[in-house]
Amino acid sequence: MLDPKQQTDKELYDLLKLGDKDAYTIIYKKYWQSLFNSAYKRLKNKEQCQDILQVVLSDLWRRRDEVSIADLSAYLHTAVRFQVFKQISRKPALSPLLDEFEILLISPVHTDDALIETEILMLIRLWVEALPSKRRAIFLMYAEEELSTRQIAEKLGISQKTVQNQLNTALVNLRLKLSKVLFISLIISHYIK
């Protein structure tokens, strides 16, 4: 068994990627309480929080070969926040807040904008990592390298129409995710006041 006090997050994550169940157990025990507290602070429901942690931590194990995580703590806490946002957005009692959402979008800069921006950027990174590999490659060439759909098609040896379809699917999905994040940000700011 690994000694949790002697392992850094990077070492634990590297072992996790190799399928080391002991490393997973250490990560689970190390982060469970802080992740639970983060979720409970927003939901105030023990069972929902436990379910969220189960989803996030089992997903970490299941997707260990698919994602690359630079900061394990930030990744796990962002994943928990995202699951909390999903839970909150399902509550029908929150629909009266739509008017406040519009006000938030047109309001002047708030003091916590930097934090919100950081969290949104982290969610976008997680979203990009979760894209199918072909769609992710197309999206990154378009967004980061600023290549045209014709250039991407030539580079990948596929039709321009395929590139346009993949890019359109990615952008529509991203817009939906961002609108949910903005809505949830409004909900959280409403309840934290």
Image (spheres, grey):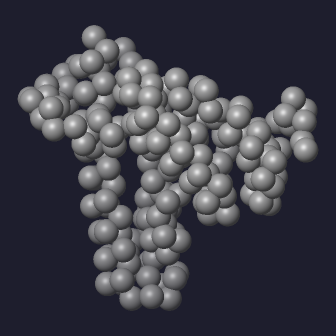
What residue do we see at 9% from left, 30% from top? 96
Residue 167 location, quadrant: bottom left
What residue do we see at 53% from left, 29% from top? 36
Q: Is residue 106 visible?
A: no
In the rendered view, tell whether residue 128 sits above or below residue 165: above
Which is nearer the eye, 83 or 182? Answer: 83
Quadrant location, the N terminus: top right
In the rendered view, tell whether residue 106 sits above or below residue 152: above
From the top left corner, tell me how far across and down residue 45 is, in percent: 39, 28
Instruction: Indicate left or right for 15 with 49 as reference.
Output: right
Q: Residue furthest front?
A: 47
Instruction: Indicate left or right for 12 with 157 as reference.
Output: right
From the top left corner, tell me how far across and down residue 54 is, in percent: 54, 45
From the top left corner, tell me how far across and down residue 187 is, in percent: 25, 27
Instruction: Indicate left or right for 186 with 86 as reference.
Output: left
Which is nearer the eye, 136 or 154? Answer: 136
Quadrant location, the C terminus: top left
Q: Is residue 132 visible?
A: yes
In the rendered view, tell whether residue 148 sits above or below residue 3: below
What residue do we see at 79% from left, 46% from top? 23
Which is nearer the eye, 14 or 104? Answer: 14
Number of labelled discs?
Answer: 0
From the top left corner, tell me how far across and down residue 114 is, in percent: 43, 24
What residue do we see at 72% from left, 40% from top? 27
